[in-house]
Amino acid sequence: MLERVFLLLCFLPVLAAETCKPNTPNGHKVRLSIKTALGAEAYDWNENERFLFQSTMAYAMRNLKGENFTVSNIVVCDETPRVSFWFVVTSPNDPSKVVSKGEVEEAVRKSRNRINQAFMLSDSTLEFIGILPTLAAPVEPPTPTWLIVFGVVMGMVLAGIVILLALSFVQKKRKKNKKADVEEEEDDEGTQVQTAENGATRVDYYNNSFADDERFTHM
């Protein structure tokens, strides 16, 4: 029994070297921009941080498949000083079997926020090359959308009613003013006619008196 365990422990590193290599079909490349994200508070990438990555990925795989994934199933290789590396995921039931790329991508998408939080990074500073960033959840307005639309429509209706009433009031006022102007013109014409008639009467009266005086003078 101990011999089998010893052989297995010796076999696993060789198996990992065979399964994890750059551009492997079921592998993923990860790139971290720690200094860009954290500046003066940036931490160094070391074995502890790598172990944390393996732990978070094991969690993500458990969260997706419900199987007993451990850090030994997350095989990391080809690390660079600028913090980039490749990794593959092996099956907890058979370490020689690599989990498909599609399942790993689905696990990353499902637990992306938890992975980012573990390293205090974001989708743009913790990049899984080839896996699209998670979309931000749509922001729900405090007021329901239908209520906003209803309020806008009612506001437009009320504005239309106010405009119609205002136009009606203005038209009535204009008609009233026009009617008053017409009546005032008619009154002025009537006054002018009456004045003209009175003037003619006075003239007639003056002429008759002048004729009588002239007749008496001749006598």
Image: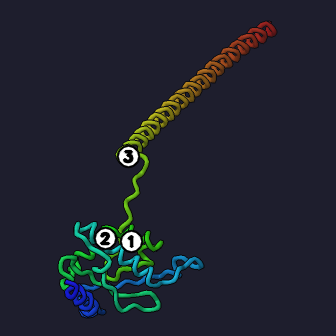
- Badge 3: residue crowd in 10 Å (few <14, some 14–19, many ≥20): few
Identity of the residue furthest to the front in this view: 2
How far, Cα to Cα, is label 2 from label 1? Answer: 8 Å
Q: Residue at x 25, y 68 (%)?
A: 64
Is label 1 in a helix, a strand or a loop? helix
Q: Residue at x 51, y 35 (%)?
A: 170
Give the residue pinned by disc 2: 60
Q: Residue at x 66, y 20 (%)?
A: 195
Label disc, if present, on residue 115 of the rendered structure? 1
Q: Residue at x 24, y 70 (%)?
A: 68
Residue closer to the observer: 92 or 123: 92
How far, Cα to Cα, is label 2 from label 3? Answer: 34 Å
How far, Cα to Cα, is label 1 from label 3? Answer: 33 Å
- Badge 2: residue crowd in 10 Å (few <14, some 14–19, many ≥20): many
Contact flag, marks 2 and 1 (Cβ < 8 Å): yes
Give the residue pinned by disc 3: 144
- Badge 1: residue crowd in 10 Å (few <14, some 14–19, many ≥20): many
Q: Quadrant of residue 2?
A: bottom left
Marked residue nearer the N-terminal end (1 or 3): 1
The reply to whether residue 151 is visible in this rendering is yes
Q: Quadrant of residue 157?
A: top left
Q: On the rendered image, what quadrant is the C terminus found in?
A: top right
Label disc, if present, on residue 163 of the rendered structure? none
Q: Quadrant of residue 138?
A: bottom left
Name the amino acid type tagged 3.
Answer: Pro
Name the amino acid type tagged 2.
Answer: Ala
x then y, percent, for residue 30: 37, 83
Image: 95 above or below 121: below
Q: On the rendered image, what quadrant is the N terminus found in?
A: bottom left
Q: Say which of marks 1 and 3 sits in front.
A: 1
